[in-house]
Image (cartoon, grey):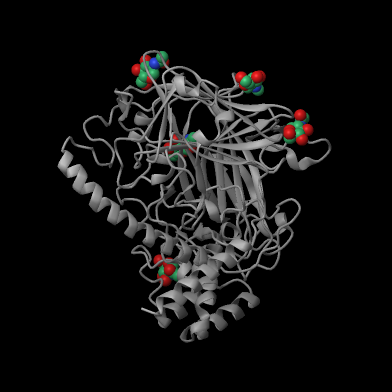
Amino acid sequence: MFSVLPFLLFLSYISAAIVAESPAYSPPDLFFFNCGASSSKQPDDDGRTWESDDKFPKFMPANAADISLVSQPEEQGSNVPQVPYTTGVRIFQSNFTYSFPLSAGPKFIRLYFFPSQFNAKGLTFNKTESYFSVTANEHTLLTNFSAYLTAGVTNYPFVNKEYIVNVDEHQMLNITFAPSPNSYAFVNGIEIVSIPTGYYIRGDPAGANDNQIKWVPDNNNNYYYIYNNTAFETLYRLIVGGQTLLADNDTGMYRKWYSDDEYVIGYGYFTPHLDVKITYTELTPNYSAPEIVYTTSRTIANYSSAVNWTFAVDSGFLYLFRLYFCEFAIEIDGGNERVFSVEIANETAESHADVFLMAGGSKIPIFRDYLVNVRDNDGRRGKQNVSLAISPNMATRPVWANALLNGLEIFKLNDTQGSLAAANPDLISQPVQSPPPGKKKGGATVGAVVGGVCGGILVIAILGFLIFRQRRRRVANSAGSITKTTWDPLSVVPPSTHNTDGSGAPLPSQAAGVDGFPPGSPSFPLLGNGDSSTTTDNSEGVFSTSDEVAAMSTTSGTGTATTTTGIDRLQSHNVFSLLNHPEGR
Ligand SMILES: *[C@@H]1O[C@H](CO)[C@@H](O)[C@H](O)[C@H]1NC(C)=O
Ligand SMILES: *[C@@H]1O[C@H](CO)[C@@H](O)[C@H](O)[C@H]1NC(C)=O
Ligand SMILES: *[C@@H]1O[C@H](CO)[C@@H](O)[C@H](O)[C@H]1NC(C)=O
Ligand SMILES: *[C@@H]1O[C@H](CO)[C@@H](O)[C@H](O)[C@H]1NC(C)=O
Ligand SMILES: *[C@@H]1O[C@H](CO)[C@@H](O)[C@H](O)[C@H]1NC(C)=O
């Protein structure tokens, strides 16, 4: 018994020490509104504290109580984070505008929706009957949006949306919810977080070439520029080859970096991670992405010739692809060692990516922006799959036949009408018959009471467990390793088309953070079994070009018996492959 207290103190000491290490960026505007919640200051699973919007009447119309209703969802899905989804809801039967006084500059707007039945003031609101539009100043974020239909095509019974909108000097940020005819609107949570000026919305080049964005395919050396009047919707933000990070582990913008496991195709990759220090630069500031994004990667496996991903996006919009790179492999200490091409939507975005040269050295992070026009072929603005591929380019005879990607963001840009809205997903999957996981509340009062009591006890137990887990996780994350967050959604907007039935990658990078080894996944029977004869064989095959490389292979090949060679093996056997023979491509 007495040993528990010191242990808890120890834990809080650790988490305090980690919290004290202030994030790279501290946003001047930071709002976490738990809309319609009856109790204030509730923490979520990601380390944020949410306040009921009722506490801020000045951000709402004076007659807010007359033109909106507050309630709580009647459902509590088993895998729905409580805050802000199930702790409250604000329902609108007519237009309703929140007006936020903010500093000038770009902001993240994050909206949280949990489609459920709501009861308020004797009225019943059916989740299938809610369609509404949302605007943010002059931008349309959603039109005739159904959270119910949107969630129906994902694995999650809730929807969260992230947008970037610039707020001008002396301007309010007005967010308006407008129900479709004979319908109602609702929202469970609104989050607003400032973004460093010039980070996503980069403006006019004014002589600096850094702000010009390359078209894919190349448009005769014409470039694209993103100005203050452009709004974005984040579709994907991925820590490539890694495990989902808590929003709290971001650089201060509370961005959630999701695992890319669901979007990578096939098995032709490795997921190296190294716990090394990287050097941020003026062009790639420390708030750009957490260090672990840059020190975690996906590279090409042995017998494969590319790493491929696929992403569902809405047709009829321009997309900004931001790719994050960092050459952290210890073998690579010069240019022309790992050179690769990047293709987006089957078109070349980069033909000779040499991250070492682009960044100006090893362990220096960079990011690159590409603009892709996803045409609307049938005028329906339906979903379309866009591919991303990295593959070795051996034209300049680089030392290694490999490629690298560390992080990825995909943003939809507003159309010429200032809108980001797309069609609701079709109802073909009949979500009415089989609603997404989530308990339907029956009419059994006794059951509800018993459930409530038991649930209360369970919640306390779970809370304790979560707090404990979260602390542990923070410690683990700060130590540079990767930990799995099992209850999180895997994407900002889970696409309708991805594989979720296990036919995709079998959690390939699950073990990646533990000791720096890539996974012992079934598709790589020779990896991760520590068999030294296998390792020796590989070392002969893998290193074949130069004396320097051959010497390295000898070192790692003979060192496999000792424990310190984990990283060596990772570096020399798993990251690189036989493909450095041109005929292997
Ligand atoms: C864009 O917005 C930023 C932040 O408010 C401001 O500093 C900048 O001057 C604006 N640029 C233009 C061209 O209006
Ligand atoms: C926001 O709403 C306020 C109050 O209704 C209005 O005065 C202001 O002009 C609006 N601002 C914008 C940018 O729409
Ligand atoms: C809203 O969307 C639903 C389903 O996608 C559709 O049936 C309805 O006609 C739409 N309403 C409007 C006003 O566009
Ligand atoms: C790479 O593939 C070849 C041929 O399939 C195999 O012999 C070799 O052991 C593999 N190496 C690794 C590291 O998986
Ligand atoms: C790219 O090519 C693949 C297969 O060759 C195809 O399925 C896909 O639709 C193409 N288009 C885009 C935009 O990725």
Task: Look at 47% across and 49% down and name the residue there.
Answer: 308
**Which percent across, then down, holds residue 494?**
41, 40
Q: Residue 331, position in %: x, y?
A: 62, 71
Lateral position of residue 339 relative to residue 541, left or right: right
Residue toward you, 320 or 304: 320
Determine the residue positioned at 26% across, 35% down: 435
Q: Is residue 203 at all visible to an observer of this figure?
A: no
Image quadrant occupied by the N terminus: bottom left
Residue 296 lies, with reference to residue 52, above or below; the image says below
Instruction: Examine the rendered structure and indicate whether residue 57 appears above or below residue 14.
Output: above
Residue 248 vs residue 158: left or right?
Answer: right
Foreground: 232 or 318? 232
Furthest toward the right, the residue is 207
Residue shown at 61% from the left, 23% from the top: 137
Residue 565 falls left or right of residue 488:
right
Residue at 32% x, 33% y: name it.
116
**Could you tell me residue 199's position as x and y percent?**
69, 43
In the image, 572 versus 131, the foreground residue is 131
- Asked which quadrant contains residue 537, the reply is bottom left
The one nearer the camera, 244 or 39, is 39
Horizontal and vertical percent for residue 130? Answer: 36, 23
Residue 109 placement, left or right of 37: right
